[in-house]
Image (cartoon, rainbow, N blue to C red):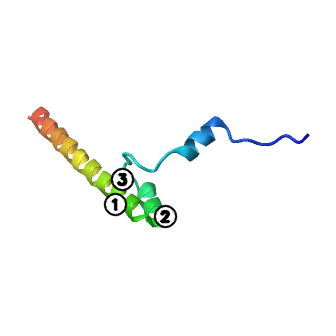
Amino acid sequence: MPIRKTKSKATKKTAAKSSTGVVPPYGPPIRDAIARGNLEEMRAVARSARKWIKDAEAALQKLEESITKLSK
């Protein structure tokens, strides 16, 4: 009897993952959403990217303030 190849548990988990949730706004997730052409997914990725950028800008501002304080 031939042996059937099955997907590993890791492969099954990866395949079952949803594209929802927090996605850092790196190029690949943005480009992939555009390529798939799913409008709701693109909107979700855009919202996630805007939030990430806003949070990163706030953190950067705090960092710059700390640098200024320590430089004096």
Residue 4 locus on image (x, y percent): 81, 42
Residue 20 is left or right of residue 68, and the answer is: right
Q: Amino acid at mark 1?
A: Arg
Asked whether 11 or 61 is in front, the reply is: 11
* Residue highlighted by disc 2: 36
Dot 2 amino acid type: Arg
Helix, strand or loop at mark 1 = helix
Q: Nearer the viewer, residue 31 or 44?
A: 44
Q: Is the residue 39 above or below the residue 54 in the image? A: below
- Mark 3 crowd level (few <14, some 14–19, many ≥20, 10 Å Cα): some
Farthest top residue in view = 70
Residue 20: x %, y % from top left: 41, 49
Q: CA distance from mark 1 to mark 2?
A: 12 Å
Q: Residue at x 32, y 51 (%)?
A: 48
The image quadrant where one finds the C terminus is: top left
Q: Secondary structure at mark 2?
A: helix
Please determine whether, in this image, residue 43 is positioned above or below residue 54.
Answer: below
Cβ–Cβ under 8 Å for marks 2 and 3: no
- The x, y position of residue 33, in whole percent, is 44, 60
Badges 1 and 2: C-beta atoms under 8 Å apart? no
Among the 4 quarters of the image, the one containing residue 7: top right
Other residues around mark 1 within 10 Å, as few (<14) / some (14–19) / many (≥20): few
Quote the CA–CA distance across marks 2 and 3.
16 Å
Nearest to N terminus: mark 3 or mark 1: 3
Q: Which residue is mark 3?
A: 25
Q: Disc 3 and disc 1: Cα gap in Å?
A: 12 Å
Q: Are marks 3 and 1 in contact (CB under 8 Å)?
A: no
Q: Which residue is mark 1?
A: 43
Quarter of the image for the N terminus: give it: top right
Q: Residue furthest left?
A: 72
Q: Nearer the viewer, mark 3 or mark 1?
A: 1
Residue in the picture at 26% in, 50% down = 51
